Image (tube, helix red, strand yellow):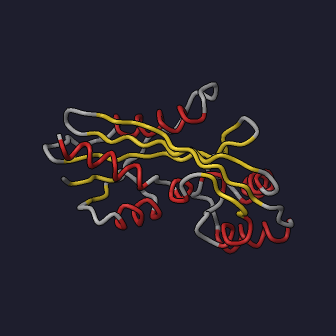
Amino acid sequence: MKIILASKSPRRQELIKGLELNFSIVTYEVDEDFDASDLPSDIARKLAVKKAHHFPNTLIDDEVLLTADTIVWINGKVLNKPANEQESFEMLSTICGATHQVFTGVCLKTIDKEISFSEMSSVTCKKLSDEEIYHYIRNYKPFDKAGSYGIQDWFGYTAVEKIDGCFYNVMGLPVSRIYEELKKIKKK
């Protein structure tokens, strides 16, 4: 079985590499608009499915396309990737001192099968000062991350107090669940 990871995310690439699977990377652009009235689990899952349906190549036997999308959910709204430093500051100020949810939607697609699901992890962050938040933004430039932070870097070390759910889901890929789903595909 060969995995085709359709993701530009270096974190997702690192996580799939850690599973010791044969994989390649294909990147392409997909409009990430979503229906804001959907449940957050559906938003993430539907975005992953949308990415799979826009795959520009034809799958062949023994290939599995893996697409994913991660969203941060707090106060009834999605925090996407920040457009600039001010938006990053606003997002981090919102999640500091609160608990938010991270949803990662995943789609696994073969020539004759499609499995999609989402995983949720709750993350509790302590309050950081404005100075600490700006330190993080200026030194780590989290503009490519949903919610404007990486759990695996300085922000995670200093602000994250508690995680309920899969740590790797917060990084962008629930690898344990993916591994189990891939085993099911391989058996068939």
State the image coordinates of residue 136 (x, y, percent, origin top left). Answer: 72, 70
Residue 35 is left or right of residue 188, and the answer is right
Q: Is residue 34 above or below residue 28?
A: above
State the image coordinates of residue 26 (x, y, percent, origin top left). Answer: 31, 54
Q: Is residue 21 above or below residue 70?
A: below
Q: Residue 127, located in which quarter of the rendered image? A: bottom right
Residue 86 or residue 47, whichever sits in front: 47
Residue 77 is left or right of residue 94, and the answer is left
Q: Residue at x 29, y 46 (%)?
A: 65
Residue 111 or residue 159, whichever sits in front: 159
State the image coordinates of residue 82 (x, y, percent, origin top left). Answer: 66, 52
Q: Residue furthest left?
A: 61
Q: Residue at x 29, y 66 (%)?
A: 20
Number of numbered markers: 0
Q: Residue 167, located in which quarter of the rendered image? A: bottom right
Q: Residue 84, located in which quarter of the rendered image? A: bottom right
**Image quadrant for the C terminus?**
top left
Q: Residue at x 36, y 61 (%)?
A: 16
Q: Residue furthest top?
A: 37
Q: Is residue 159 above or below residue 175?
A: below
State the image coordinates of residue 28 (x, y, percent, origin top left). Answer: 37, 48
Residue 174 is left or right of residue 132, and the answer is left
Q: Residue at x 80, y 71 (%)?
A: 132
Residue 24 is left or right of residue 99, and the answer is left
